[in-house]
Amino acid sequence: MSSEREIVFRLNGREERASVSPRLHLVDFLRTRFQLASPRVGCEHGVCGACTLRVDGAIVRGCLFLAVQADGKDVETLEGVTASGELRDLQDAFVERNAVQCGFCTPGMLITAAELMRDDKVHDRATIRDHLSGNICRCTGYEAIVDAIESVMVQRGNRRAS
Amino acid sequence: MSVAEAPDSGYVGRSVPRPQARRLVEGQAQYVDDILLPRMVHAVFLRSPHAHARITSINVARAEEMPGVIRVFTGRDFAEVKTFAGVLAHFQGMKSAQQPCLAIDRVCWCGEPVAVVVAETRHQAEDALDMIEVSYEELPVVVDIESALDPATPVIHPDIGDNMCFERELDAGDFEAALARADHVIERTFRFPRHTGVCLEGRSVIGDWHSAERRMTVYISHQAPNMVQDCYADLLGLPESAVRVICKDVGGSYGIKTHVYGDELATCALSMMLGRPVKFVADRLESFISDIHSRDHRVKATLAVTNDGKILALGFEDRLAVGPYSVYPRGSAVEGNQICNISGQWYTLEAYRARIETVFTNMGPYSNYRAVGHPVSVGFVEGMVDAAARTIGMDPVEIRRRNLIPDDAFPHKALSGPLFEVMSHHRCMDEITRLMDYKGLRAQQAALREKGVYRGIGFASMIEITNPSAMFYGVGGIRVSAQDGCSVKMEPGGSIVVLHGCGEQGQGTETIYAQIAADALGVPMETVRLVTGDTEVTPYGGGTWASRGAGVGGEATWQAARALRENILALAAMITQSQPDELDIVGGIVVDRTTGEERISLAECGRIAYFRPDTLDNFQPELMVTRHFVPKQFPFCFTNGVLACHLEVDIDTGLIRPLKFWCVEDCGTVLNPQLVDEQIRGGIAHGLGPTLYEQCLYDERGQLMNGSLVDYLVPTTGEMPDTVVGHIATPTQESEIGAKGAGEAGTAGTPGAVMNALNDALAPFEAELTDMPFTPEKVLQALGRA
Amino acid sequence: MKSAAFDYAKPASVAEALALKRDHGGSARFLAGGQSLLPAMNMRLDKPDLLIDLNALAELDGIGDAGGTIRIGALTRTAELGRSEVIARRLPLLGRCVEHIAHPAIRSMGTFGGSLALADPAAEWPAACLALDASMIVAASQGERTIPARDFFRGLYTTALDEDELLVRIDLPAQAENARSVVLELARRRGDFAIAGVAAQAAPTNDGRLSDVRIAFFGIAEHPVRLADVEQAIESGGTDGVDAARAALEAGVEFTSDLYHAAATKRHLAGVLLGRAVAELLNDEA
């Protein structure tokens, strides 16, 4: 059980195999083994949210999830979500509303926001703020981010209504 | 033509989205840690666990035997690297000891690098770090701001005499006479906590030394590439032409990344010693103990006021506690100096007396961070103004209206010395009170108080130093450029490349340069591409600090693009056998100026200029133009604004909930309203943090007690309310674009506005707080409840 | 900072997990949600030789309704407790805790049992279990035992768990039909650990009083606190009993300090929360 472990998992829709050291957390693993840069290392103690990604559809802190734990799981990063087009409207809104400055928190913000938007409701700003409160942004003061998310919730709601 | 006269169809003045944001929202940004070079190895630093100690021995033998370790280095291994200290020659009496890139024999702060492991992976380097054996003999520490200069307090660097880094006094007008004439002399003491920038991306660098070419390429997360080039060349003993600095995406900077850090410099030296690319990325824990901190002031202030609200005089003594060395190259004394220069200078004072003392301590390094000095100046002065208003029973807006420099009184020579070109305090106050429905808010406040709900409204009027000239650093012998260069090139297909010495870290600098260039040339913005952050290819520039990117860098862009336009028109006139002044460029096409009829496309101009110049007789097209710009008439471009805060205090728990902010800022020409607004909103978060939440807490041994994101509290979405932003535009005449800086207002005004709102909310209890951050405990103590 | 190296085992049964723990003792850690353990390891504050990953043990996961008793597997995630209809209906006090616990991404992984076994004094789950008279079912190689919540939390990050024991399940009596619950917490930022918090439940009586009062405090002492004198004062006096209850609280608790708040501040805040909790329990509109 010592040293490297074999894992098989889905990464952005493709099955992958890898041999991993148990101590490697999922972010370092994805960054170094697959050159996926979107999960960012911001604190490595689970506070900043820059490494937020999806495992089996749920958002998790990539720095508090071991690569060995990904065995048998379905892992999604912003690269995969971008390719699928799932968040195209939200990504557009982030650009349009300038909800991104340095961009370091942005992948985590988008992945976290997407979870709230999954229920197709138009949440109020307080709920949006609450949901994002585990993702630190040091550039924007957050308002543009909340604006962008809110605007896409309304757009999606309008599209469903029409 | 100036930008203000550009046609409405132009880009300047519109909220054009940032084209660069697309790669950021798709996860394709490239920060230093994303860069992978062949043969690259990783450096991890062992940092001192003591604030002040003698190093009696270091044993790296066991560490060097660890798997993956290339070598372990200590301070003495860097003998070839010069020591450094940021001492500004025009700051009379300023001093500092010389700092080595890694400690030698003695450590002076908890977090100072002592040794460095280079290994194949970061994990391996960290494993080896645990095996380095260092013996220390602890020395007495200086951490208390009040006793730092006492004779009984040890001197950190005996060879410089005492613990004073820089002191300055300023006395203008007859202070004593003003006090004697006043109806009230208000006295208060304020505390502004030590805090830090918390860039989400830690400081990061790759040194890549090519021994055959004797050339160093530095990939670095930094705001000032040319400064890094100049400093590193000097400190590493290389000609400046041998150092190329590349800054790609930067994950937050806020002034934290304008300095030379020993560990980053050492990383480049390691590359020279090992002949391999070496990467260093500061993790979160070491960022807290090695990034620069700022603020940490104790201000004792005096304000003389008459019963009818006339402020006669302002006096103060400010002591601020910096680290053990003056940070290189900008120093640790600009904060205090700015406070001397600007405090209260937005009012028509009769007398002004200032004294600042910048003292060395064994706490972490300290230097310039967003809005240098401003949050302290604005904070304590605006706190004093509100205290005066409460004393004489006057509305806080009214007392400001009676004392702010009249809008028609410019240019105005401040009592502290500087000349202010043009400001708009009263129009800003009119606009903010309109935006917030001040009267309505006061009525709501009174009604809620009846129900036991305590809300407060607070204002902070302010000025900000932006667009600095060479008077900022250059005159003090500090080789930080005040000028910016821009090259604009038309390519054969008619597209435009802008190469600029000033880059960006997310502010939108590149976008406004593209807007300016597109308008100046008359081309679609989509055809303009920006190149920044590479000293090898861009003109020399200062980078982003002191809100200079738009006003200084933007003007260089305007001048270069206008000059290129002239050259294109000359070429087009040659080809079309007309006169340049008969032509114009609209939408990327050369047209007849009067009829608007198309004459020739830029692509056709490019084709002929580059591939068929033989058809142009002796005419030589110049389709790449470089222009430089630096402000010369005014040492600094002072902007002004006002910020207001509305908050609610739970008087039983002491918890404060910010409800809303308003800010009206005059940054001259507003080049891109959305980008300016977001600078202000982001700045407010940096102002709110240390007012309510953030503080670097040191114990008596000089240990940072809250150096993680668990314990050091930066504002989240849950704490930051929405902000309404308004603009008054009085362009500076110093440049054609007329833009002043906009990056400081939010940070500068927020602490004062929040403090005033808090004390307004607590006014029924006659409770008043001046000791930031305002924790629930302090609020309860002020209310006599805990 | 990166974790030091360790071995990793992912047992397929509780028995296997317990045997590993028995064999490795204090140098092994059980990995449940990992939301507290992995940060400590990333900071190299904790350097175990072996991680025993419990996440394959389906027998530890899930929420069961056994009539009057709700059984919660120790590996049940915080997010699952927040989504559970059983919890919302039968143990609303637990449901009310969820929104106070950290942030969504942490709640995806963090487990009920992990939080209880860690016994952070400022955490919600230990206080809620104390208030609800939960029974902790713990297993070791030699068998299972049940520890009442009131005997489980011993001190700062200290529980009654022996080194080779594993918390496998928590049994909680379902809330009475007419009972009301409230969870209040004071934090400077959204999602932070509480400066002071209270988890309370009571049943209103026909004459406008409260019966079966349970009030547990967190964030104020080395472990969650529940005092009979406090609860009795509220049962006998309702709102009028708050002053007596506060006095009992102040007399009965050894208040601690944290980085930003002195013990005296926590004492004051606990008293404020007590009053607010009682007012909410008595509020028929709520």
Image (spheres, grey):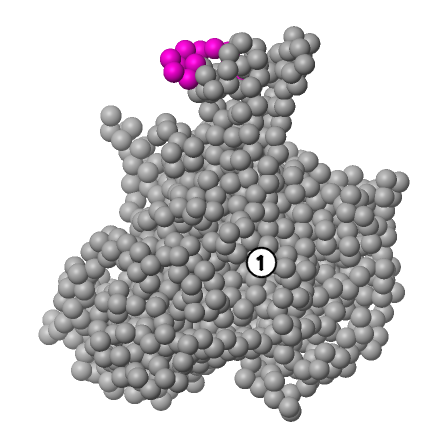
Q: Amino acid at mark 1?
A: Met
Q: Residue at x 77, y 64 (%)?
A: B83
Q: Position of residue B357 (x, y in %)?
A: 56, 77
Q: How many marks?
A: 1
Q: Position of residue B254 (x, y in %)?
A: 53, 55
Residue found at the far left of this picture: C207
Q: Chain of mark 1?
A: B
Q: Is residue C225 above or below residue B716?
A: below
Q: Residue at x 18, y 71 (%)?
A: B449
Pick whichever, B258 or B293, lies toward us: B258
Q: Is residue A19 visible?
A: no
- Quadrant location of the N terminus of chain B in the rendered image: top left
Q: Residue at x 40, y 72 (%)?
A: B380
Q: Is residue B153 visible?
A: yes
Pick whichever, C36 or B245, lies toward us: B245
Q: Is residue B264 above or below residue B394?
A: above
Tell me which segment is drawn in magenta: B592-602
Q: Is residue B492 above or below residue C123?
A: above
In this rendering, position of residue B427 left or right of residue B588? left
In this rendering, position of residue B526 left or right of residue B778? right
SS assignment at label 1: loop
- Quadrant location of the C terminus of chain B in the rendered image: bottom left
Q: Is residue B587 above or below residue B672?
A: above
- Does B289 appear in magenta? no
Residue at image mark 1 = B471
Residue C271 placement: quadrant? bottom left
